[in-house]
Image: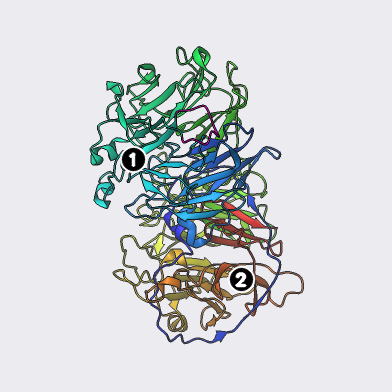
Amino acid sequence: MSSILATLLAGCGGADNASPAAQAPVLAATIKTATQARWMNVKYGGGGYVPGLIYHPTSPDVLYARTDVGGAYRWDAATATWLPITDGLHVRDGFYHGSESMALDPNDDQRVYMSAGMYVSDKADARLYISTDRGDNWTYVNLPFSAGSNSPGRAVGERLMVDPNDPTILFYGTRTQGLWKSADRGQTWQQVSSLSSTKMTQDQISAVHWSGVVGVAQVIFDTSTKGTGSATQTIYTAVAPDYASVAGMTFSMYKTTDGGATWNGIATPADTAGMYVPHMVRNKDGMMYVAFTKDTGPGAAGPSRLYKFDGTNWTLLKKYDAEQWVNFGMGGLSVSGTGATTRIALGVTNSWGNWDGQPVVQLSDDAGATWREISAMAPHTGTEMWAGWTDDVEIDPNDPEHIMHVNGGGVWETKNASAAKPSWTRKVDGMEETATLSLMAAPPGASYRLLNSSGDIGMKVYTELNKTPTLGPVGLMNNGMSADMAWSTPSYIAAIGTSTWDHPTVGGAYSTDSGVTWTPFAGHHPQGLTNQSDLSNVAVTKPGNIIWTPNNAVPAYSTDNGTTWTMTDLPAVDPTPWIYRGYKVVADRKNPNKVYAYNPGGAWWAKGSETQHFYASTDGGHTFTESAAFKLASDYVTDLPSVSIAVNPNAEGDIWVADGRAVMHSLDGGVTWTKLSTFAPFWGANATWSYPELWGATSIALGKAPLGSKSSASVYVVGVVNGVWGVYASDDGGVTWRRFNDDKHQYGGIAQLAADQSVPGRLYMAGSGRGVLFSY
């Protein structure tokens, strides 16, 4: 899954050097207590990488999926859907909204462990989440090392394992600090220095940044017993070459026969030297099956090898070497049965199933003596890609005909693995892992409901919220960055996104039939193909008239469907590395000649940063005039992920800005402004710093007001009220507010908002890697 950093961090602390004097009227507000909304996902289905599936070894249908940035899920057999189990994570916990490893207690199918922390460093910033009710509720402890749920090599493992004989004991194979052990169900941890006491420095970690640090990749307890009360004595672990080279370790596998007091290296076959061990499994008969591959993944390339190991001898079962046009690695590995009839399922990565027999999921029913391909060119439901990142494969412990594998877009399964051509279906109902970059709700009367621009999947046009969308500029863009429609003629839609391999000179497209067919822009903004960041945005005033705003660039407009582009007269922004700078531009829905542009300034510490600026245009976005009142009222700097602008579609010139710290409101097209006192940053531990722990107001949207409302639109804001972060709603123009979400629905952060213009109280919002949610 692509790392959409701005989306994941939106709503967290950011830069702020506010002046104490804000020269604008201040509107005091009242907070009301109300029943919070109920939430469900706008359906896409999957959409992101699932590095690992974890079965309970004995309890049927107890199954979990861990994602890299979108939390974790539990399978619900009764409804045949995935249930999200980490939606309660607060925005300040967004760094932990991805799981590096999960472990189940073989003696207690209610107990679940989940390590979290998205990126590897030399810091002790990982967490262990612990649940005793299958993930319905969690507690956590801080871990003395880092984790990398979204770092390279995130499918290896599992790293975290529970001793089946003494479940108070847990082992964890870390990326940078060797092997660690807990003897109190994860509450405290000690490094297993008998294996290695090395702790990698940041320089050592950075030296292998692009390939990723894998470290101690897996722990295997060599036992078929459980619940004896005596700690398992024989344990295997795999060590990646990145950590081994720093720690002076000369083997890729180690074994202890005294519970970890001492370790001995295991000589692996010569043709696996320098390779990683993505997965190794122990069969019930004690045979070890070990996959080796050259790269870390996702979708690791080869050469690669599969061996079995009886404790003394290695037997080669499968090998791939680089050939012209192909270079297959190995990823997922699972076994079932015993002895000569052991079933082995092997995931082959960096393979796309382009021809009959090309390896994607290899199956053996004779312990590796013979193999056949069960996925490539087999019947698959739907058009979504199913190959490529086959980095975890699992045979159901209770049904060997049921095999699942992961890929970059979710989970696939077959229930007739023995068939000559097994049939495969996507197992993604309830699993929503898209990274949303922009949302736009349709006007009343449109034939669609929502425009969703997301990382990796492009832009989608939703005609029904409970069905996977089929409309959009398919194949024209990788990341969908922004989309807008002509309000009076909603059949006209324009979208921008990142270019594709097949269309390297296309940065945007338009549709005149509500998204059924699309035409690429014949031209492009002068910086549209070079500044394709997540924060770029587009606005449409009327059919054919488009304003395109790349990150770090001045907006340009087109009056001919994107054939030619002319720069607006807005001031240039100083492009600053690592800072999201530029403009957010929106069109007035009642008067298409009016367009508003907002520049939040940058970041207080960055070169070229300044105060915030607001501009208005009366000629369709060609020329702009700055609002002096806004500059006085909001005289500090913020970067683009922490701000938002919305217009009331029912009233000309009714503009709302969430400027990071507060909400600003204008009723006259930006000439004068009122600052709402409701929202304010939460400084917390950052009280003496230049930026808050939580921004005061980051996202804003306006939707249809309920019958009898005092305002023509309801207002929704993501922000902090009285020190409590959440989504807040007002139906009376900001006079009174109520909390709209609750602590069980925080999604590790909430970024993009859009509000329905036909259904009162319906809000669309993007969770952190959790797709799009809507209230009902």
Quadrant of residue 427 within the rendered picture: top right
Residue 211: image x %, image y %?
32, 41
Span of residues in magenta: 222-231
Residue to which mark 1 is pinned = 215
Q: Residue at x 35, y 18 (%)?
A: 312
Residue 691 appears in the figure:
yes
Residue behind mark 2: 648
Image spot of residue 657 (x, y percent): 52, 73
Amino acid, disc 1: Gly
Q: Which residue is more in the foreground, 380 or 278?
A: 278
Q: Amino acid at mark 2?
A: Asn
Q: What count of labels does the image hold? A: 2
Judge left or right: residue 354 versus residue 86. Answer: left
Separation of marks 1 and 2 at Cα, in angstroms = 53 Å
Q: Position of residue 310 (x, y in %)?
A: 40, 19
Q: Quadrant of the C terminus?
A: bottom right
Is residue 484 shown to the viewer in this render? no
Name above or below for residue 274 compared with residue 480. Answer: above
Q: Position of residue 513 (x, y in %)?
A: 61, 49
Residue nearer the viewer, 701 or 3: 3
The residue lying at 26 percent from left, 50 percent from top is: 201
Query: In the figure, 148 relative to 59: above or below?
Result: below
**Label 1: few (<14), some (14–19) or many (≥20) C-alpha neighbours in 10 Å:** many
- Residue 756, compared with residue 474, is above or below; it is below
Q: Which secondary structure lies at badge 2?
A: loop
151 to 652, vertically: above or below: above
Residue located 34% across and 69% down the image: 572
Secondary structure beneath dot 1 equals loop
- Left or right for 615, reference 466: left
Residue 122 falls left or right of residue 38: left
